[in-house]
Amino acid sequence: AQTVTQSQPEMSVQEAETVTLSCTYDTSENNYYLFWYKQPPSRQMILVIRQEAYKQQNATENRFSVNFQKAAKSFSLKISDSQLGDTAMYFCAFENYGGSQGNLIFGKGTKLSVKP
Amino acid sequence: NAGVTQTPKFRILKIGQSMTLQCTQDMNHNYMYWYRQDPGMGLKLIYYSVGAGITDKGEVPNGYNVSRSTTEDFPLRLELAAPSQTSVYFCASSWGLAVTYEQYFGPGTRLTVT
């Protein structure tokens, strides 16, 4: 069975600094996708960034980037120039290519607080 | 566009009662999903639909039913509510396969069963 582990229940960072959130996953599949979702206090889930496992290049979206290490089954999220609006729960998620549609496997989340 | 809307926002049910959680999207998406999020946990898929008239089970379907008579609506029915169904429920939609197209989430419904 696939699992996603986020080992940091809570983290904090000063505004404008950089923070890295960790995620490891377990799968025997070779083709899959990895995601980071943000859930602010409003509860609405927002996709932050997505990585295809077959791509060696790490995905980047503005201040958000990932460090994807396929052999180590690691998928960390780096937030640069942290902003107060980045305060939220962050969930790492995994989905097999060709698996049940929409069956994202989520980690338990990391609560990030950005301090002024 | 309103995106994905869910009603109600909050609900308290007694054990054994039934209710329907409503979900509507105005983006003409074919795919719709229902997830539940238990305290301190990530989301788990309950049911999904790839188009009107087509539904299938996700990871945790027991105690729930769905229907998809239109593209826009995907209601989730709870029969004989149990305390284990206390959770936050999220509806989502996407153009196509979740691995290719972003899922758009509604704001959630917080359900308490006592």
Image (cartoon, rainbow, N blue to C red):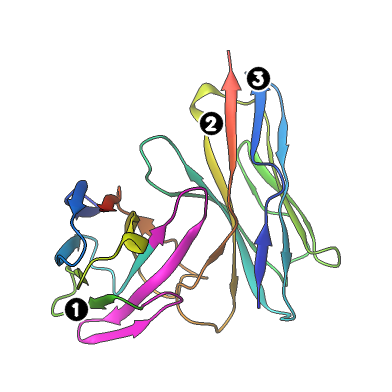
- Which one is closest to the eye, mark 3 or mark 1? 1
Whether residue A102 appears in magenta in the rendering, the answer is: no
Chain ID for label 2?
A: A
Whether residue B37 appears in magenta in the rendering, the answer is: yes
Task: Report, in whole angstroms, how far the alpha carbon at label 2 lies from the one at label 1.
Answer: 35 Å
Residue type indicated by callout 1: Arg
Q: B7 above or below A70?
A: above
- In contact (CB < 8 Å): disc 2 and disc 1: no
Task: Report, in whole angstroms, how far the alpha carbon at label 3 lies from the one at label 1.
Answer: 46 Å
Q: Position of residue B45 (x, y in %)?
A: 42, 70
Work out which quarter of the rendered image holds the C terminus of chain A and state it: top right
Task: Kindly indicate whether the residues beneath marks 2 and 1 are on one polypeptide chain.
Answer: no
Chain ID for label 3?
A: A
Q: Position of residue A65 (x, y in %)?
A: 68, 45
Stretch of the chain drawn in magenta: B36-61
Residue under label 3: A16
Residue type indicated by callout 3: Ala
- Crowd band around label 3 with a 10 angstrom C-alpha radius: few (<14), some (14–19), many (20+): some
Residue under label 1: B68
- Crowd band around label 1 with a 10 angstrom C-alpha radius: few (<14), some (14–19), many (20+): some
Residue under label 2: A86
Residue found 58% across the figure and 52% down from its top = A108
Residue found 52% across the figure and 48% down from its top = B40
Residue found 58% across the figure and 48% down from its top = A109
